């Protein structure tokens, strides 16, 4: 069984639905129409390019090319995390690269090399999409955690300094914000897992079923990917908070003003 | 004990403190006064290492406060802020917060000592089990003083800590700080504090404009 292709006309029908949100956003003068338009164009172009590129990557199936592609994804995701968390790249990107790179590659390695074991083990058809799903979710969780962490300490400076002045080390003083940031980062995934299959049919499972897999296999993949996502978000958020704490504070333990973009 | 030698503190483009010079001997009590925004709290925060001087130096116990020594200053000084930070759980948790940190873990006080301190501040023992959300501003300030006293330190840095206290509580806190052997650097506008402390340091626009010595027992 193969998936029915979507031709250009069919795709245009789907795009036409965008007129509804565009009208709503325009009526309420949200200022989001232009941004939405740019985002839709970007998404379409990026996906078209990725589609073409992935075709080559899958055909070539070269281990080095696969690893290089994954590293590109990690770099883009890390830069996005720092930028979206309203932080400056120069100060924090190296730490976030290590945090996201380490957490996602460890989880991906266990998922693909230890559990799934495709032949060949570096098969792009497994490595790239699974890596992308883990990375995408890890990225979203880390934006939330880093943003909550630094803005929380900045906004509640008195609470933070109070601990520091009572003799706490930076690691001890930031603990309440680490706790809040981890909770904020992981809560969406926990909620998604709790309602999965009842409230929503997850994207990967739907995709597999549309692609011709039997539902039982699709369910097993979806379960595995959700666990992998949760582990990578938790590991990534914890690692990033630990690493960014090392560079986000000055030698007196005060949060550095120059790490914020505004 | 505490000395500011020609200290200037800057933040971004503005000057917060300019050429601040004063000193305090061990056991001395000094009160900083001045209009709002003149830099009173900044002096206390600079001693605690929240601001690094752009010029001059701050010394505590003969040692310059630097990134390397700031931890020992924080461990030796009990800081009491204007708005007490007690957390959002029970008063007991807020009171014992300093003792959850490694530096103070061995100094965790027993129940008897806690009761003694609370009693001294006219706080009921059952306040410990109440939530910090339901106690009054005055009670919060007294809990913050109790917490500082429980650490057993001899140097107190206090930032307008009696603003929500009634006359009786203010008197109690003042008497506790006036005990011999305790060094106090406080920001206050209360007449009693100004009169009964050894020294008044007046700050205007980030600069010391007057240092006045009181004779103990004047009151």
Image: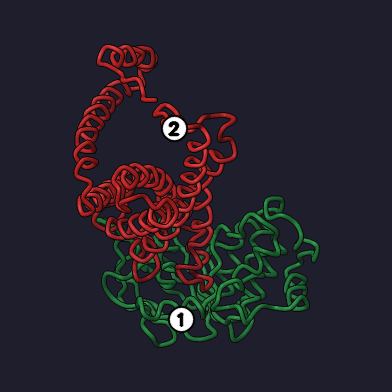
Chain colours: A red, B green
- Relative to residue A165, is residue A223 depicted above or below? above
Secondary structure at badge 1 equals: helix
Residue B216's image quarter? Answer: bottom right
**Between residues B34 and A205, which one lies in front from this camera angle?**
A205
The residue marked by circle 1 belongs to what chain? B
Give the class, few, some or many, for how many residues have Cα within 10 Å of label 1's Cα (few <14, many ≥20).
Answer: some
Residues tagged 1 and 2 counted as in contact (Cβ below 8 A): no
- Relative to residue A132, is residue A103 depicted above or below? below
Q: Position of residue B120 (x, y in %)?
A: 75, 73
Give the class, few, some or many, for how many residues have Cα within 10 Å of label 2's Cα (few <14, many ≥20).
Answer: some
Q: Are marks 1 and 2 on the same chain?
A: no
**Between residues A114 and A94, which one lies in front from this camera angle?**
A114
The residue marked by circle 2 belongs to what chain? A
Q: Is residue B40 left or right of residue A58?
A: right
**Quadrant containing the N terminus of chain B in the rendered view:** bottom left
Q: Residue at x 62, y 85 (%)?
A: B180
- Relative to residue B185, is residue A185 depicted above or below? above
Q: Is residue A24 left or right of residue B86?
A: left
Q: CA distance from mark 1 to mark 2?
A: 64 Å
Q: Residue at x 71, y 50 (%)?
A: B134
Residue tagged by mark 1?
Answer: B72
Residue tagged by mark 2?
Answer: A213
**Quadrant containing the C terminus of chain B in the rendered view:** bottom right
Q: Position of residue A261 (x, y in %)?
A: 29, 48
Q: Position of residue A216 (x, y in %)?
A: 53, 36
């Amino acid at each position: 069984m193969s998936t029915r292709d979507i031709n250009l006309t069919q795709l245009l029908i789907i795009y036409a639905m965008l007129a509804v949100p565009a009208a709503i956003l325009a009526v309420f003068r949200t200022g989001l129409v232009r941004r939405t338009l740019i985002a839709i164009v970007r998404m379409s172009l990026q996906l078209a390019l990725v589609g073409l590129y992935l075709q080559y990557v899958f055909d070539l199936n070269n281990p080095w090319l696969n690893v290089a592609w994954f590293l590109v994804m990690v770099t883009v995701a890390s830069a996005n995390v720092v930028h979206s968390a309203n932080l400056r790249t120069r100060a924090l990107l190296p730490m976030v690269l290590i945090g996201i790179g380490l957490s996602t590659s460890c989880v991906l390695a266990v998922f693909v090399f230890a559990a799934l074991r495709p032949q060949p083990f570096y098969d792009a058809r497994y490595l790239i999409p699974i890596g992308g799903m883990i990375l995408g979710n890890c990225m979203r969780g880390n934006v939330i955690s880093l943003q909550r962490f630094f803005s929380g300490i900045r906004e509640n400076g008195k609470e933070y300094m109070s601990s520091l002045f009572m003799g706490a080390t930076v690691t001890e003083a930031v603990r309440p914000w680490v706790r809040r940031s981890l909770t904020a980062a992981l809560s969406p995934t926990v909620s998604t897992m709790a309602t999965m299959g009842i409230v929503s049919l997850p994207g990967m499972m739907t995709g597999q079923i549309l692609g011709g897999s039997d539902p039982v296999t699709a369910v097993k993949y979806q379960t595995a990917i959700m666990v992998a996502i949760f582990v990578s978000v938790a590991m990534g958020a914890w690692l990033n908070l630990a690493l960014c704490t090392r560079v986000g504070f000055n030698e007196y333990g005060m949060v550095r003003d120059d790490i914020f973009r505004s | 004990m505490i000395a500011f030698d020609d200290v200037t503190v800057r933040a971004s483009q503005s000057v917060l403190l300019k050429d601040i010079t004063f000193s305090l001997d061990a056991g001395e009590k000094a009160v900083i006064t001045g209009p709002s925004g003149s830099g009173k709290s900044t002096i206390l925060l600079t001693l605690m290492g929240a601001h690094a001087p752009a010029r001059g130096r701050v010394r505590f116990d003969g040692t310059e406060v630097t990134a390397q020594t700031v931890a020992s200053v924080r461990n030796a000084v009990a800081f009491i802020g204007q708005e007490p930070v007690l957390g959002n759980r029970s008063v007991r948790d807020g009171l014992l917060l300093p003792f959850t940190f490694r530096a103070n873990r061995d100094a965790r006080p027993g129940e008897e000592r806690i009761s003694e301190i609370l009693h001294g501040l006219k706080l009921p023992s059952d306040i410990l089990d109440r939530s910090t959300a339901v106690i009054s501003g005055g009670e919060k300030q007294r809990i913050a003083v109790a917490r500082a006293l429980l650490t057993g330190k001899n140097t107190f840095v206090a930032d307008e800590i009696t603003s929500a206290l009634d006359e009786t509580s203010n008197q109690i806190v003042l008497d506790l700080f006036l005990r011999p052997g305790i060094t106090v650097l406080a920001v206050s506008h209360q007449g009693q504090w100004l009169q009964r402390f050894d020294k008044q340091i007046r700050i205007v626009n980030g600069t010391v404009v007057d240092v006045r010595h009181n004779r103990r027992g004047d009151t």
